[in-house]
C-alpha cells in the first residue's frame, strides 16, 4: 500500500542457519514476506523484523513419479519468479500465481490464490521454525489450509516448502497465465498501490458486491479510497497514511453491517498498533 512506519530493527538472513540464529537470539520476531497483503501502522513495528524476500530464495526442480515434478523452494522467492521458472520448464500448477505479488512464504501462510487455484492445491510439505525454535516439516492435513488461511501461527517462520507440479506444454501454460492475468487486470485496480482484496468473501456472497451495494465505491479518507473499479480494494491515491486506510476499513465494516447484516472478515493483516 506504500504506507506505514519503520521497523525498529530489520534483519535479512542469508541462510536458514542465520534465520535460526536470529530467532534463538531474539525470540519472537515479525516475519515480513513481500509486504503485499499487510497494513503496517504509521508508528511502525517494534522489535525485530526479519525480512525473507530477496534472500532465502533458492529453487530446485526434481523429477517426481509419472508425469509429476517436485519443486523445493525457499520461502523468500517471489511468486512471480517461481511461476515464471516453472512455466519455462513446462511445469503446470502455478499458473494461478502469475500476477499475485509477494513471496512464497507469505503465499503459504495466507493460502493465496485465485479462482484458478490456490497454494493448498500444490503444497506437499512446508518446513518452518516453530515457536520452540526448532525446524519442523509438516505435510498433508497438518498444513491446515482453508480459504485464505493456513495452520501456521504468527510465530511460525516458514523457510522452505515442496510443491507438486505436472508436466505440460509451455505454450499452453503461458496461455493460461496470460488469460488469468488479463481477466484480473480488467476487474482490479492493479495500476495503484493496494493490498489486494481487503476482506474475505463471506459464504455465498462477495465482499466487493456488498461494499458496492452499501454505496461505498469512491469513499475516501485522506489518500485512501475504496476503488471505483473493484470495491474490495482500497487504493492509495497519493500520500495516504495507514490511519486513513484503517479509517476506510472501519467505515466499510460499519456500513456493510448496517446495510446487509454481514460482518466482513479482514483478509489483510494489521501489523503494529491500531486502535480498533
Ligand atoms: N463485484 C461487485 N462490485 C465490485 C467488485 C465485484 O459487484 O466492486 C462482484 C462481481 O461482479 C462478481 C463478484 O463480485 O460478481 C466477484 O468479483 P470478482 O470476480 O472480481 O472476484 P472476487 O471474489 O472479488 C476473488 C479473490 C481475488 C482473486 C479473484 C480472481 C477473494 C477475497 N478475492 O475476488 O483475490 O484475484 O477472485 O480469481 O477471494 C486477493 O485475495 O487479494 C485477491 C485479489
Image (cartoon, rainbow, N blue to C red):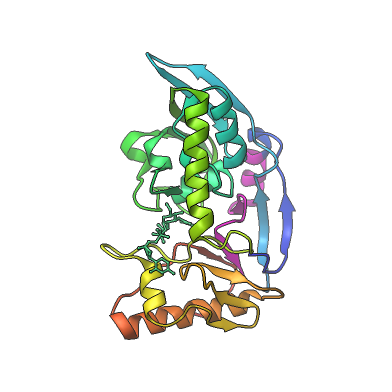
How many labels sit on residues? 0
| Residue 128 visible, this angle | no
**Nearer-the-camera pick, 136 or 143:** 143
**Nearer-the-camera pick, 158 or 205:** 205
| Residue at the (49%, 25%) spot, across then down | 91
Task: Answer above or below: position of 218 versus 11.
Answer: below
Residue 190: image location, x then y, percent:
59, 59
**Any magenta on residue 29?**
yes
Which quadrant does the N terminus fall into? bottom right
222 relative to 178 in the view: left or right: right
Residue 6's quadrant in the figure?
Answer: bottom right
250 relative to 209 in the view: left or right: right
Residue that sits furthest to the left in the current view: 204
Residue 133: image location, x then y, percent:
54, 42
Residue 81's quadrant in the figure?
Answer: top right
**Any magenta on residue 87?**
no
Q: Which residues are magenta?
A: 19-41
116 relative to 262 in the view: left or right: right
* Quadrant observed for ligand 1 in the rendered image: bottom left
Amino acid at each position: 500500500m506504500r504506507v506505514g512506519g519503520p521497523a525498529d530493527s530489520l534483519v535479512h538472513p542469508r541462510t536458514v542457519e542465520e534465520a535460526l540464529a536470529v530467532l534463538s537470539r531474539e525470540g519472537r520476531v515479525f516475519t515480513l514476506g513481500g509486504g503485499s497483503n499487510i497494513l503496517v501502522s504509521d508508528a511502525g513495528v517494534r522489535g525485530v523484523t526479519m525480512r525473507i524476500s530477496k534472500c532465502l530464495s533458492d529453487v530446485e526442480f526434481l523429477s517426481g513419479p509419472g508425469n509429476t515434478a517436485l519443486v523445493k523452494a525457499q520461502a523468500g522467492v517471489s511468486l512471480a519468479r517461481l511461476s515464471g521458472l516453472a512455466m519455462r520448464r513446462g511445469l503446470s500448477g502455478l499458473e494461478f500465481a502469475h500476477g499475485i505479488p509477494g513471496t512464497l512464504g507469505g503465499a503459504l501462510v495466507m493460502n493465496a490464490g485465485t479462482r484458478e487455484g490456490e497454494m493448498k492445491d500444490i503444497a506437499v510439505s512446508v518446513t518452518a521454525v516453530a515457536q520452540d525454535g526448532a525446524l519442523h516439516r509438516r505435510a498433508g492435513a497438518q498444513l491446515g489450509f482453508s480459504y485464505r488461511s493456513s495452520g501456521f501461527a504468527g510465530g511460525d517462520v516458514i523457510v522452505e516448502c515442496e510443491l507438486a507440479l505436472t508436466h505440460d506444454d509451455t505454450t499452453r501454460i503461458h496461455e493460461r497465465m496470460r488469460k488469468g492475468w488479463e481477466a484480473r487486470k480488467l476487474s482490479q485496480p492493479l495500476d495503484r498501490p493496494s493490498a489486494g482484496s481487503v476482506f474475505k468473501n463471506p459464504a455465498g456472497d462477495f465482499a466487493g458486491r456488498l461494499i458496492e451495494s452499501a454505496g461505498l465505491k469512491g469513499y475516501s479518507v485522506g489518500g485512501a479510497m475504496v476503488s471505483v473499479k473493484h470495491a474490495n480494494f482500497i487504493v492509495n491515491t497519493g500520500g495516504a497514511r495507514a490511519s486513513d486506510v484503517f479509517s476506510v476499513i472501519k467505515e466499510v465494516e460499519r456500513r456493510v453491517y448496517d446495510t446487509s447484516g454481514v460482518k466482513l472478515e479482514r483478509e489483510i493483516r494489521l501489523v503494529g498498533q491500531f486502535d480498533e
